[in-house]
């Protein structure tokens, strides 16, 4: 914003010139409040067709990060009771380990992230447990991957639990 005024009558400053700065005023425009946005995953796309009609082939599905106005559920994927099949016929198992904080669970996940069978981890504040979610036929305790076992994480994994990862939209009503 800018405002200017002119001098109608020159004051007598004992012969000194008028200060031109006194004749104008500059102010910063107020910014509208920044719109709060949250980053979250979109829903999975439908599974694509096979990449080949015979031999080795792959299917593809996607999801992407998007900005939303409402705060998303902090747990995008959740682990339910019992071995289940998710909406894409994928089965998952979880291995529980006691951890004092969510940060410890995140550290463990960073150690495991290179393993192709690791799908994620979730931390339960109530139980003080970190659930490492893996493909149903994987057992992280039997892995020979040195990055995991050099850290002593093997002793932290206390045995299998079970559960499925499902999207939060409708997952709460899903039974297996």
Image (cartoon, rainbow, N blue to C red):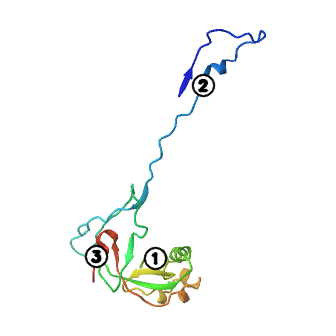
Q: Earlier in the sequence, mark 1 or mark 3?
A: 1
Q: Residues within 10 Å of mark 2 (few under 14, many from 20)?
A: few
Label 1 vs label 3: CA separation? 22 Å
- 24 relative to 130 in the view: left or right: right
Q: Nearer the viewer, mark 1 or mark 3?
A: 3
Q: Secondary structure at mark 2?
A: strand
Residue 58: in sight, yes or no? Answer: no
User: Which residue extends farthest left?
Assistant: 53
The residue indicated by pointer 2 is 25
Pick the residue in front: 91 or 15. Answer: 15
Q: Quadrant of residue 72?
A: bottom left
Q: Depth check: 118 or 128 in front?
A: 128
Residue placed at 66% from the left, 18% from the top? Answer: 20
Comes first in the chain, label 1 or label 2: 2
**Which of the image's four quarters has the C terminus?**
bottom left
- Residue sitting nearer the eye, 113 or 11: 11
Which residue position is annotated with label 3?
173
Relative image position of residue 122 (x, y in whole percent): 45, 76
Q: Is label 1 in a helix, a strand or a loop?
A: strand
**Mark 1 crowdedness (10 Å alpha carbons): few <14, some 14-19, many ≥20:** many
Q: Position of residue 59 (x, y in %)?
A: 28, 70
Write down the residue under mark 1.
121
* Cβ atoms under marks 1 and 3 closer than 8 Å: no
């Amino acid at each position: 914003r800018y405002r200017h005024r002119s001098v109608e009558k020159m004051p007598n400053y004992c012969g000194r010139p008028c200060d031109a700065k006194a004749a104008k005023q500059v102010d910063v425009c107020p910014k509208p409040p920044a719109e709060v946005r949250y980053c979250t995953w979109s829903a999975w796309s439908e599974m694509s067709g096979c990449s080949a009609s015979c031999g080795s082939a792959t299917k593809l599905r996607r999801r992407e990060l998007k900005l939303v106005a409402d705060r998303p559920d902090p747990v995008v994927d959740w682990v339910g009771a019992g071995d289940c099949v998710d909406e894409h016929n994928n089965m998952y198992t979880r291995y529980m380990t006691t951890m004092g904080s969510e940060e410890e669970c995140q550290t463990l996940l960073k150690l495991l992230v290179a393993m192709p069978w690791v799908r994620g981890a979730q931390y339960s504040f109530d139980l003080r447990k970190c659930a490492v979610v893996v493909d149903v036929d994987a057992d992280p305790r039997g892995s020979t991957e040195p990055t995991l076992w050099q850290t002593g994480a093997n002793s932290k994994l206390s045995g299998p639990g079970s559960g499925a990862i499902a999207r939060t939209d409708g997952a709460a009503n899903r039974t297996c």
